[in-house]
Image (cartoon, grey):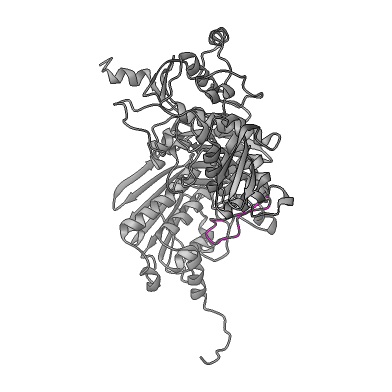
Amino acid sequence: MSARAIEPLPDTLIDQIAAGEVVERPASVVKELVENALDAGAQEIEVIVERGGKQRLRVRDDGHGIAPEQLALALRRHATSKIRALEELEQVRSLGFRGEALPSVAAVSRLTLESRTANHEHGYRLQAHDAASSAEPQPLAHPLGTTVTVDDLFYNTPGRRKFLRAERTELNHIQEALRRLALGHFGVGFSLCHQGRTLWRLNPAHSEQAQQQRLAQLLGEAFAEASAYVEMEGAGMRLSGWLGLPTAARRQGDLQYLFVNRRLIRDRTAAHGIRQAYRDVLYRDRYPAYVLYLEIDPRQVDVNVHPMKHEVRFRDGHTVHEFLARRIATALAQIEPATTLPTGALPTGAPPADATAASASVPTSTPSATAPRAPTQSPTPPRQSTLALGEARRLYGRWEPAEDAAAAEDEEPLLGYAVGQIRSAYILAESSRGLWIVDMHAAHERIVYERLKAQQAGPGRVEMQALLMPVTMPVTPAEAERVERANAELESVGLEVDRCGPDRVRVRAVPALLSGADPAELLREVLAEWPEWGDRDPAAGIAPTLHPAIQRVLALMACHGSVRAGRRLTIAEMNTLLREIERTPRAAQCNHGRPTYALLDDTALARLFSRGR
């Protein structure tokens, strides 16, 4: 290729190149235009679409409008009313600020801009095929606000038009773009029409009930019912919104919305912090659902790092990560999922891990505020007691009827009082709220796990109990080598193991809470769960990066040593277990995210027997 002289690009081509960064498809246009409407103070926004946005897009708002002498400026690149100096760029408070949306759209469509301000009796119209072909504004009748009509998107860039998908696909993208904006601005009404048919009509939602209704309209009744509203503050930040219950976790991360200063963003640091908060209550292949709003000093977040403004950069990402991880984890521990069974008929079989038939009570203000009747961490270890099984004696206190009766006079326990056991797996308990059904194994698993975690986090190691007769077991040479190098990690989770041959190890002690477990089987499961043990310098201690792996192992141990189905308990022992559940954090679900108890309330019971009809 022969050398070519350097020349400035034509303005039209410059605008079309810039449009490629902003306008990907019709949904991109909707996003930019609706964000402009929100910045203009609109209270009602109407989006009209034809042929999935390929033929026409129209966005109407009742904002403060654009003065006639500024209509042409609105179509000029880098012309904006939202920032004036670097100081304002470093603390952006508006959704748009670059002044590229309208000129970029105008460069690849036939754009018509109509607007009226409160200072003018009538509005003005400006038509443009691109940013360079603007004519003088023409007067017309128009209500207060702005209407932007975009016809024939990509008509002058056929290569871009070929990449557009079917009308239904493009419409789905438009709906998702509008859904995100509507979730971020409850005080604004939205409507969406396609081919003359109204698809959406969302009224402004100022009350808690109206916001819950909008949440259900946009994300479905299942999420609205299986989530809890939270508010918390700290480290100069405020977080509010809806946390999906662990029992409503999904197989993909398609219901995760995080807004920073009302701007929907994607950020790995923040997303990791939220996921870490859920790690104790979810399967590893499940994703939490949430709609969260983080308010932070605009000077602490840079929104000018992506043309589409999807990504941000926090000036102190570590603090944001820790705030989200710790506060959300605390909030999850306080939520009391009053899981209610379907009222039409009793379900059959075990509930799936992503079951959504749940409701939740709501912690308010900061995470330190306890939700009504929410299970919370006991400041001191639970008292000693007895269960039918030997290991249970070390977990619970001796149930004292007099003490329990005195408590009942004071306040009814959350889970009421046991009335029996069915299928040797579930406890039935009665309270003023209805009939509780408790999964013994799932609940006990959570209790054991929290006890193990508390021990490991306290002195740095789980309390051990020496075996009367050490157990020698065969392993592979690689496993034997790993055990030899991983004494610190093994002792931290309550296992004392040493190598006694090329392919032999000896278990000398196990966690005191699990003294009834098979030592050899327990060690095999631990080694299988944590294959990276032994891959560090023994003198370096336990690396912080291994702490999540330690918790995974503790969860496995809890599952291994908890009460199994098929064991019969007395009424006293059942009540002991119920009281322990109530004072254990995160006891509403097991370590894998499955619910530990469900409520069949009075309404459901009445429907089962057609009472009141």
Q: Residue at point 37% right, 70% down?
A: 155
Q: Is residue 547 left or right of residue 151?
A: right
Examine the rendered structure and indicate whether residue 65 appears above or below residue 342: below
Examine the rendered structure and indicate whether residue 613 appears above or below residue 94: above
- Asked if residue 310 is among those painted magenta in the image, a careful observer would answer yes
- In terms of image quadrants, where is residue 477? bottom right
- Report whether residue 230 is seen: yes
Q: How many marks?
A: 0
Q: Residue at point 61% right, 42% down?
A: 506
Q: Position of residue 602 (x, y in %)?
A: 37, 17
- Report whether residue 51 is seen: no
Q: Position of residue 443 (x, y in %)?
A: 49, 28
Which residue sits furthest right? 539
Q: Position of residue 425 (x, y in %)?
A: 41, 26
Q: Is residue 150 left or right of residue 408?
A: left
Extent of the magenta region: 298-315
Q: Position of residue 90 (x, y in %)?
A: 67, 55
The quadrant of the image that shows the C terminus is top left
- In terms of image quadrants, where is residue 174? bottom left
Along the viewing direction, whichever of 26 and 195 lies nearer the viewer:
26
Q: Main secondary structure of the magenta part?
A: loop
Q: Residue at point 38% right, 34% down?
A: 351
Q: Is residue 71 left or right of residue 451?
A: left
Examine the rendered structure and indicate whether residue 137 appears above or below residue 474: below
Along the viewing direction, whichever of 305 and 85 lies nearer the viewer:
305
